[in-house]
Image (cartoon, rainbow, N blue to C red):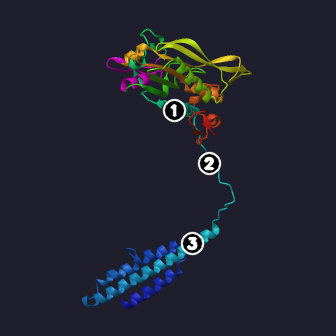
Amino acid sequence: MEEQRERLEGELLAAIAAAADLRALEEIRVRALGRRGEVTALAKAVGRLPPEERRAAGQAVNALKRTVEEAIARRRAELERIELERRLARERIDVTLPPRPRPEGRVHPVSQVTEEIVAILADMGFAVAEGPDVEDDYHNFTALNIPPEHPARQMQDTFFLEAEEEGAPLLLRTHTSPVQIRTMLAGRPPFRIIAPGRVYRRDYDMTHTPMFHQVEGLLIDRRTHMGHLKGCLIDFVRAFFERDDIPVRFRPSFFPFTEPSAEMDIGCRRGKGQLVVGAGDDWLEILGCGMVHPRVLEGVGLEPDVWQGFAFGLGIDRLAMLKYGIPDLRTFFEGDLRWLRHYGFVPLDIPTTYGGLSR
């Protein structure tokens, strides 16, 4: 057996030294040390020797195994070094070339304008409040002093659901005003909140979609009056459109939840198929507003003789159309990447608190 061991050691060490690559070296390892390898077979043969010869033969075979393993490890390290040197010589990077362009995402105009509105009104002290999209009749209509015969309750305007809550049908909210009701019921005055979010109405054309976005504001305090409302909204539109010369007027109107109520118009100029916000000889309705109706205050447990406040509501999508010249509201929801690349915003535009965005 000793002669066989010496012969096998010489053959394996020569083969290991001559291995040209890692694949050839692995084949030699399997040939020598695998389950059916030559060294493994020699180790099994030790068991068939006479007892007095087994110890010495076993030690010799174990020494052969260690020698072969160490030789394979050294040759593997040498081959890996050679392969690395070849790769370094073959694979080059030209660091003078410009990087390949990476697709850059865009912020949707609705998201951008929402951030602008929130930033401006937050600087005036308004906090953001949220509420559910699925509402009940009380919070969406009754608590806002909307009588049963009001057209907004009819099927042609409101998305009613089959589900009911306490016997009353549920619906998709038609405005974010229910957030005002929930806020006043859950807390104690004074209140100064804005409620941005999705709303739903059965309408679809160039300036209306079944789902759109609104932001509504509410301020309740002991000494709030119409002058505060007008000052707040005038400052807001001038900050949003980033123009100090925008003329503003308020026209009497009607909303069930405010008294007195008003529509706010801003000056504009129309011509050659364009609408330019600012000084001009024409007017454009921009939002609705008014002093909170005493019945609404009573409904949430506030005494109208003690607490007064104002509310306003405006369409986020419509403001985006006006400020950034987007002609058709329906394109906001079509998911066209070409449209988004044109009208979208770079994500690094950082909102500031007053006076629009810094770019």
- Residue 87 vs 191, above or below: the answer is below
On the image, the x and y values in percent for residue 239 come to 61, 29
Identify residue for label 1. 122
Q: How many marks?
A: 3
Left or right side of 266 for 290: left
Question: Farthest residue toward the top?
Answer: 149
Q: Amino acid at mark 3?
A: Glu
**Region rendered in magenta:** 158-186
Quarter of the rendering occupied by the C terminus: top right
Sequence-first tag of 2 and 1:
2
Out of 234 and 227, give the one closest to the viewer: 227
Q: Secondary structure at mark 3?
A: helix
**Could you tell me which residue is drawn at 48 percent across and 27 percent down?**
194
Classify mark 1: residues with Cα within 10 Å, few (<14), some (14-19) or many (20+): some
Question: Farthest residue toward the front?
Answer: 223
On the image, the x and y values in percent for residue 19 come to 52, 78
Out of 264 and 161, give the one closest to the viewer: 264
Residue 102, numbered circle: 2
The answer to whether residue 311 is seen in the rendering is yes
Residue 83, numbered circle: 3
Q: Amino acid at mark 1?
A: Ala
